[in-house]
Image: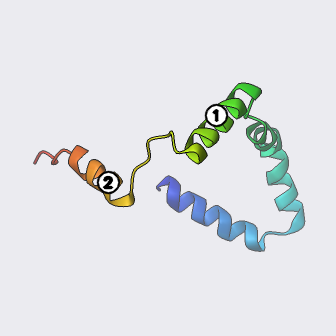
Amino acid sequence: MTTTAIRKKLVDYLKTADDKKVKAIYTMVEDEINTQANDWDEKFIAQLNDRKKSFESGKAKTYTWEETKKAALTGIKPAKK
């Protein structure tokens, strides 16, 4: 089973699971959820702020959707048969 299928099954299950089971599942992953929410350290936040300022001032090189799409499609190598 693919990860996508597993995610869908879990989401569907959590919608109807009883409270006790939802709390038990949450308890198993609570630390990981809380850690991921705090993964942005000061250095990373400063880098995001610098990029934001660069974008807002017009100094950052940006691309249109068409330029991005063209670059992506150009970079795809045909599959070997």
Query: Between 10 and 64, which is closer to the camera in this rendering?
Result: 64
Q: Answer with mark 1 or mark 2, whichever residue precedes in sequence.
A: 1
Q: Please, which colouring scheme is shown?
A: rainbow
Categorize mark 2 by other alpha carbons within 10 Å: few (<14), some (14-19), many (20+): few
Residue 30, position in %: x, y?
82, 44
Q: Residue at x 76, y 28 (%)?
A: 42
71 relative to 5, above or below: above
Residue 3 lies left or right of residue 20; in this view the side is: left
For the residues labelled 1 and 2, the Cα–Cα distance comes to 24 Å
Relative to 22, is 67 on the left or the right?
Answer: left
Q: Can you tell which quarter of the image residue 41 is in? A: top right
Give the amino acid type for the residue marked by disc 2 in the picture: Glu
**Residue labelled with disc 2:** 67
Element assignment for label 1: helix
Residue 50: numbered disc: 1
Q: Residue at x 88, y 66 (%)?
A: 19
- Which x, y percent locates residue 27? 85, 47
Query: In the orientation shown, which residue stands out farthest toward the left?
Result: 81
Task: Name the kind of residue labelled 1 in the image.
Answer: Asp
Q: Residue at x 76, y 39 (%)?
A: 32
Residue 18 as seen in the image, left or right of residue 51: right
The numbered mark at residue 66 is none
Q: Badges 1 and 2: C-beta atoms under 8 Å apart?
A: no
Above or below: residue 67 compared with residue 31: below
How many residues crowd mark 1 within 10 Å: few (<14), some (14–19), many (20+)? Answer: few
Numbered disc 2: secondary structure? helix
